[in-house]
Every structure is written in C-alpha cells, then in structure tokens.
Amino acid sequence: MATIAVAGKGGTGKTTICALVVRYLLARGETPVLAVDADPNSNLGQTLGVEVGITVGSAREQGFTGDREIPSGMTKDDFVQYKIQEALAEAEGFDLLTMGRPEGAGCYCFANNIIRRYMDALADDYCHVVMDNEAGLEHLSRRTTRRTDVLLVIADAGIRGVDAARNVLDLAAEMELEVGESLFVLNRAGDKARDALMPEIERLKLPLAAVIPEDPALFEAEVAGRSLLELPDGSPSVDAAAPLFDKIFGTV
Ligand SMILES: Nc1ncnc2c1ncn2[C@@H]1O[C@H](COP(=O)(O)OP(=O)(O)O)[C@@H](O)[C@H]1O
Ligand SMILES: [Mg+2]
C-alpha cells in the first residue's frame, strides 16, 4: 500500500498526473484506489469522469454551523463520519473524496479532528491513496498518523518553474511533513527543455524522476469532456509516466 501525494504550482499538471496515477493503478488491477481531491480550485472528479456530490468541506459546515441538521440520536462525530461517507463518490476500481472548501476562520478544530481521524482510518480500506494537493499543502499538513510514501513535485518547463518546485519543497520541510521520498517531475517538456533546465534541476537536489512531454491527447480529452482514464495506451503522457509508476508501486 502506498500513499502518493502530488504537489506543485497551479497549472503545472498536478491533477493530470494524479489521473495518470489512477489510470495506471486501474490498468494493473492495483485496486481499490482512494483518490483525494485536496485542491479546492481543482477538478480531479471531472478528470476522472466522476460526478462530485457533497464535499467534506460542506459536510463539516453542515455538521458544525447548524445543529438542527444533525438528526436526533446522532453525535456530531457520527454525523461527520456519515457525511464523509456520503461525500465518497464510488467508481469502478476507485473512490473519490473531494475535500472542497478549506475551513474558514471559525473554530472548526473539533470537526477537523474528527475528519482527520476518520480519513486516516478510511485510507486503510484501500490498496493505494493518491492525493491531489493545492499549492499550500494544507490538507497534507493536517494528516496525522499516515505518512506520505512518495511526494511528486511537479513543475512545467516555463519560466521559474523549477523555482516554484523549490518553494513547494521548502514548504513541505517547514511543515515537517513525513515524506518517504520526494521526486521531481518535469511536465510539458521535451529533451531540449530538460537539458536547458538541468543545472537548475540539479540545484533542487531532488531526483528528476520523469519528464512528461506535451501530449495533445490531454487537450483533446479536456475539450471533449472525456475522462483521462480513457486515454489510449501509447499516449505520450501515459508512456512517459509509466516507468516512474513502475518504480513507485513496484518497490513500495
Ligand atoms: N503533458 C501535458 N501535455 C499537454 N497538456 C497538459 C499536460 N499536462 C497538463 N496539461 C494541461 O494543462 C492544464 C493544467 O493541468 P492541470 O493538471 O489541471 O494542472 P494543475 O492541477 O497543476 O493545476 C490542463 O488543461 C491540462 O490538460
Ligand atoms: Mg489541479
């Protein structure tokens, strides 16, 4: 069982790479997978072709801002667990949990503790956990008992892309996240861009684990509203990511 977290600046390809991980695991029968969308500005559900109903965030609001919502005879604890269960969208071979809105300024510590505890327990029911994070790594920092086996830091080949990856690493270090291994993935790049960026990547002191090329199939899937799980074998992004995933899931 492995927990993979994907992090990086917005727009670098985190959600896409999460979907590629899920696709990889489904194709190899490494199921069930728990996919967690921990980026409120994200759309992992859409990318995986899953209809998202309520989110964990909205369950928390319901349970903790209006007591009338809680059926009599149910504790808040029970209610939050029940609501999170309801927020779990089931699909073929995987479930998707969408975290939704981060908590506001109000005191939700109690709710968050329940959510944290429940999510740690929930993860035990799965073969692998794949987590799509926002740039601030908020949800990742909240996890308690479960460590992240692999943190994939994604950057694109754009200007300051590698700098942004360094920020993510610094943040992870500051938060003292328990991470087994951090790996660097350069997305939307060819050999030329990789070579040009190599000195910068070396300064990152993170192994360059994969280079994913620009893949027209991703754009086509997006405009057609198709799930990335339907990407055909042989798509450039699928093929480029496969050796990395072989390594991650073959060894953990
Ligand atoms: N290797 C790639 N080739 C072509 N398009 C890509 C590639 N990686 C990501 N994209 C596109 O870039 C956009 C942003 O990717 P996304 O995964 O949503 O980034 P993030 O989750 O980091 O914000 C999407 O439209 C996606 O289809
Ligand atoms: Mg995203």
Image (tube, rainbow, N blue to C red):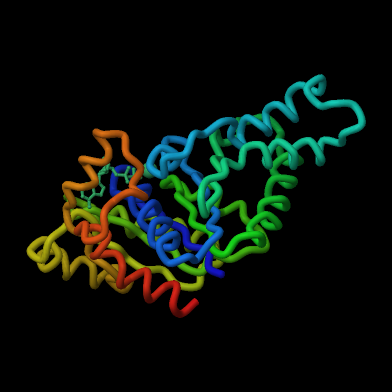
Residue at the right extreme? 73
Front one among 166 and 179 = 179
Left or right? Give the position of 135 relative to 201: right
Q: Is residue 188 above or below residue 43?
A: below
Left or right? Give the position of 32 relative to 211: right
Q: Is residue 151 above or below residue 93?
A: below
Residue at the bottom extreme? 251
Left or right? Give the position of 196 relative to 70: left
Front one among 44 and 191 = 44
Question: Looking at the image, how many numbered discs can be counted on the residues?
Answer: 0
Front one among 74 and 141 = 74
Name the image quarter holding the N terminus.
Answer: bottom right
| Residue 249 locus on image (x, y percent) | 45, 72
Res 171 quadrant in image = bottom left
| Residue 44 locus on image (x, y percent) | 43, 42
Res 115 quadrant in image = top right
Please tell me which residue is depicted at 24% across the width and 64% down the height of the picture: 239
Left or right? Give the position of 43 relative to 144: left
Q: Is residue 205 visible?
A: no
Please tell me which residue is depicted at 71% across the width and 57% down the height of the picture: 121
Please tell me which residue is depicted at 44% across the width and 62% down the height of the picture: 25
Q: Is residue 191 visible?
A: yes
| Residue 40 locus on image (x, y percent) | 47, 36
Please tell me which residue is depicted at 52% across the width and 49% down the height of the picture: 36
Ligand 2: image quarter: top left
| Residue 18 locus on image (x, y percent) | 40, 53
